[in-house]
Amino acid sequence: MSDPIRTAIKASLFSPDAGGVAEKLLIHLKVFEDLKQNDATKGNSIMGKPRYLCLTLKRNKGRLHKTKRNQNGTFSIGKSWNLEDIRQIEIVDKNQFAMTLNKRYVWSVEKPSDKMLFLAHVVDNCQRFLSRVPRLVNIDEGQLMRMIVHRSVSQVGPPGSPTTAVSPSPSYDDHNSPRISIPSQQIQPTSSNSTSAYIAPSPNSPKANSYRSGLTDTPRLGSPSPIAGSTFQGASAQVVEAPGIRSPSYVSHHKDERRERELAREQRRERERKEKEQKEQQLELKRAMARHDKLMEEDSMMNVDEILTDFNWKTSGNAAVLEKRLLGELHALEAANVHAIIQSDERVQSMVDRIDSALQELDNMESWLSLYAAELNSMGDDIYEIETQNRGLQILTVNQNNLIKELDHILDTISIPREYLDNLKYDPLDTPRDIDRCQKSAAILQRVLKTKLDDNMDELVVVQEMMEMYNNCSNEFSTRVYDYLISKIDSLARQLMAAGVPAQRKRPMAHAHDSVEDALTPYQGFSLWFKEMEPRMYSELQQHYAVSFAPTFERDIRDMVDVTRPYFSNMRHRTYDEIEYLFRSDESRTARALAYGANKLSSVAGAGTGAGYRGSMDGHANAQRATFDDDEKAAADAFTQLIAQCGTHVCREQNFLCEFFQQSPMAPRSFLERGPVIEHVSDKSHLFSRHDKIRDVKIAKKLRNLMDILFESLEPTLVPLVELALKTDPTQSAGMMTAVEYQMYKWQGTDQEFIYAFFESLFMRLVRSFRQFVAEQIKIIEDTKINSKKRRGILSTFRVFPLFVQRLELSAQSTEPESQTRQTVNAAYEKIISSMMSSLDTIAKESDEGGDDKEQLNASIMYIENMHHYYHALRSMKLPLLEASVKDAKAKYESTLASYIRAVVRRPLGKLVEFFDGVEALLRTSTPEEVAFHVNYNKTQLRRVLSGYPPREIHKAMEQLYKRVDKHFSEEEGLLQVIWRGIQEDLIRQHERMERLINRCYPDAGVHLEFKIQDLLNHDGN
């Protein structure tokens, strides 16, 4: 059987119609490319793209085509390569192989045997037409050739049948049939009787004719091609064309030859020589085969002409005319045969008569059947008419029944008993039972109004009339409930205003509207009705509620403010300039205020004669903290409670609004989902609870607007109270900021947007006031820096600042480190400290610019006193923000004190100190022995300097030095004894230094200081 794929490929690509007359298809192979992972080993279930590799021959030049099968069954060429492009052939695994052309291609096949056969043909054609073989990887070339031999044997026929000799390398004639040739020594007789060579019959004998005719069906022999790695040893090749050649003998011999070749690989050079001889023999055989083919073709044409002449037919060269003539003669021959058979039998006439009689009877039967068919057709029409009418009646009955059911369903759906409609029109709304009855009837009405009928049933006139009636009833009910609630709200607002405010206690307290909440709670279900059915009335009802009860909340807030205001009025009565913890210039501050400020932070008494000069800085300050008096503390507590009560009052009212108007997230989504009627609010603690933010922006905005209307007087009422408190004492702003910020933190992130916004606005107002106050204080400090004429003593700003800090810390003592209040106060500290230090530096700089030693000494005294006071006053507060400035003050105090001591010590021991300073300087460049011979520092100069400081003069100089230090420093800060002790320590160091230098540089002079250390310490300031 022919291969349909091969036939289709030839018809599409290599047929005359396709323009492929000169190109012959040798073999094709179905392959798969672009394989998925692990698909190559699946055999018949490969999931790659199917393609067909075609090996062709055109003018002794082989080509390799990759084709694909189209949807219409035809084939098209995708890529083409010449055999010269094949550089390497590799077998990857059982199903896969690779060819290296312009790049490496990997294909997979379903049957490994087909792959090997195709590769064998490719290798054979490369050897034949290119005289070379591509590089073979994982391929046994001998095995490929054996596959070609077995394939050729199966095509020729089984053993014992007439066939031709088989060669390891097939070639192809014009009809794509294999031509097989082998060396002559491989042709052996298949039986013992065949001892002579076969002799071809003469061309004119009958055997020759039959032999010639058999040549058209038998594969023609072709010239052998050399095979790489294998040679046929022995005789020269000759063409043999005779039946009786047994192919198994060749196969057996070939296997033996393969084994011998494998065992004789060491004789490579001998084999190469033999291969060369064989190639020459094969070329000669190829020429002989070409001559033989030409002779056989001429013999075949002569036999055909003889056959046509014997039948007396002329060869016109037109096969169609010849075919038509043959068919006509065949038909005429068949007709003559039939006629001859009929004429030879006598019973034919009798049979014909009987057939005529039977035909007549059949005609009669056909006429009767036609009559019966007409009658039956008439009856069938009547029956069809009856069935049609019956079917129409049945459909009509079914439709009428369905219509009745649908109408009943519609009536049941949209019909409302008259009793419920009357409840909506006439029932009172005073008691919870009346309210529940009306709400149930309203729920039935709403359910009917929201009903949507199928199949446009709502377009029926009766349905539209009923819906119009129900809409009118709904409008009337909405109007009646709306008017009733408006009247109810007005009545409750008047009663609440008439009742007045309960007697206030000592502290501000918000009074809840319990009566209003209990009276309106039963009607909260109607809010859902208005929300769904009458949005306009719903909004108007909310606005009316807010407008009606706004005066009551304004009265409540004013009452709490009135209770709080006396606390600020009762604070201690003193002028703004008399407040000791505020910065004022010395000219504007009264004597009483200055004395009060000085007494608030008393200095630490010196430790006496035995105390070190650093003891003042390291000791604990006994300064009294500036504290609130009772009136101030009561005022701060009252303000804190006031804003807390305002926040609670606003929160409760907003929660009640959300419940009454059903705007909370937990509220029912529709009137049909409402809960039972609540007679009054049983547990009112939930009205004070905080809830998450409302996600619906529209609802949140509407609720905020209602709260703005209800509490529009909150800010205008509280702001004057805040301004009164700040006017009395600006430092109150710190405590107020603390209280307000706590309320901001409490309500932040909740649904109480109104109260949070109010506290935020109030906090920003307080921050602005505090910053303005701090700016004024800094301006006063700068004015003090410019106008001050003092060059000694503690500046007023340094006296006031510790009290200022204590006052603010007491006011903001409950703030968190990360709070805005703490950050604002800390920023104020930094600005004031910077201004104070700048003022002190400026005054000291002005003193230094004078060039006078006295003025420079006064600047040092001022630094010592102010830094000492600053450190002692602020160290005990332990404020993290002030730690850096306190450390800086201590360092500046110690450095300035050391400079002051060095300056005052030089006055009583000036020349003596200068002499020994020179000795020390000379020791850096000279030896101690050389110092005694220096012209300015010899022994004579030493005795002259020492003679100027007898003990009597030293005692007198110490008395003058103490008086001078006592004049510089008063006992107020306890600095006198500290500084005097430091001076004594420095004098002792100077005495020890001088004695040490005398002993080192003047050991043989026999001189010493005339005064002793005790002479320096005799004067202790008493």
Image (cartoon, helix red, strand yellow):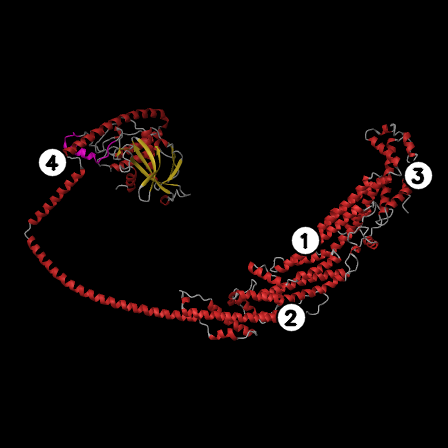
Q: Amino acid at mark 2?
A: Leu
Mark 1 and mark 3: span between their CA atoms? 65 Å
| Disc ID at residue 496 | 2
Check whether the beta carbons of the residues at disc 4 and disc 3 lie within 8 A of each other.
no
Pointer 1 or 2: first along the chain: 2
Q: Is residue 704 visible?
A: yes
Q: Secondary structure at mark 4?
A: loop
| Contact flag, marks 1 and 3 (Cβ < 8 Å) | no
Q: Which numbered dot is residue 820?
A: 1
The reply, left or right, for residue 370 in relation to residue 510 is left
Q: Mark 4 — residue?
A: 312
Q: Is residue 206 magenta?
A: yes
**Residue 260 percent location from the top left of the image:** 33, 30
Picture quadrant of residue 280: top left
Q: Nearer the viewer, residue 442 or 605?
A: 442
Name which residue type carries label 1.
Gln
Give the image location of residue 625, x and y in percent. Answer: 78, 55
Q: Quadrant of residue 57?
A: top left
In the depicted view, which residue is nearer to us: 611 or 599?
599
Q: Is residue 197 visible?
A: no
**Amino acid identity at mark 3:** Glu
Residue type highlighted by circle 4: Asn
Which circle's residue, 1 or 3, is located before the other in the chain?
1
937 shown above or below 458: above
Q: Secondary structure at mark 3?
A: helix
Question: In the rendering, which numbered label is found on residue 953?
Answer: 3
Part of the protein shown in magenta: 201-221
- Say what secondary structure mark 1 lies in: helix
Q: Nearer the viewer, mark 1 or mark 4?
A: 1
Local crowd size for mark 3, using a 10 Å CA cut-off: few (<14), some (14–19), many (≥20): few
Q: CA distance from mark 4 to mark 3?
A: 179 Å
Q: Which of pointers 4 and 2 lies earlier in the amino acid sequence? A: 4
